[in-house]
Image (spheres, rainbow, N blue to C red):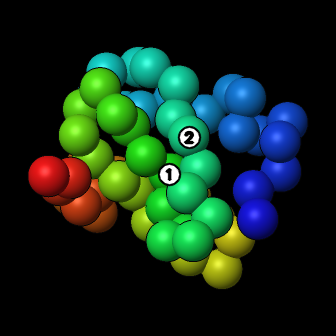
Amino acid sequence: MIDPWLLERLVCPVTRTPLRYDETAAELVSDEAGLAYPVRDGVPVLLVEAGRQLR
């Protein structure tokens, strides 16, 4: 689980738009960029190289 306070402040490193947390997949999703960033041991990995393409 991501702290709600932190989630409000995190943005996609590509588009600078807010991210949404997908609890099932443990990923932060940027709908605008079409990328999902992993959350490992509670730590968001917001590296473009670590992002998974959606669709």
Q: Nearer the viewer, residue 47 or 23?
A: 23
Which quadrant would residue 40 be assigned to in this image?
bottom right
Q: Is residue 38 visible?
A: yes
Residue 25 position, x and y percent, is 49, 71
Left of 15 or right of it: where is 11?
Answer: right
Residue at position x 24%, y 32% in the image: 33
How many marks the image carries: the answer is: 2
Residue extending furthest toward the top? 16
Q: Describe residue 40's horizontal placement relative to residue 34 as left or right.
A: right
On screen, residue 9 versus residue 45, left or right, reads: right
Question: In the rendered image, which residue does mark 1 sit on?
Answer: 28
Residue depicted at 59% across the width and 50% down the height: 21
Where, by quadrant of the figure, is residue 32 drawn?
Answer: top left
Q: Position of residue 29 (x, y in %)?
A: 43, 46
Q: Type of residue at label 2?
A: Arg
Q: Which mark is residue 9?
A: none
Q: Where does the N terminus fall, quadrant-wise?
A: bottom right
Q: Amino acid at mark 1?
A: Leu
Percent x, y for residue 53? 17, 55
User: Which circle's residue, 2 or 1, is located before the other in the chain?
Assistant: 2
Disc sitting over residue 20 in the figure: 2
- In front of the other: 25 or 48: 25
Q: Residue at x 28, y 57 (%)?
A: 51
Q: Residue furthest bottom?
A: 41
Residue at the location (69% across, 70% down)? 42
Q: Circles 2 and 1: CB distance less than 8 Å?
A: yes
Q: Is residue 32 above or below residue 49?
A: above
- Label 2 and label 1: CA atoms lie apart by 6 Å
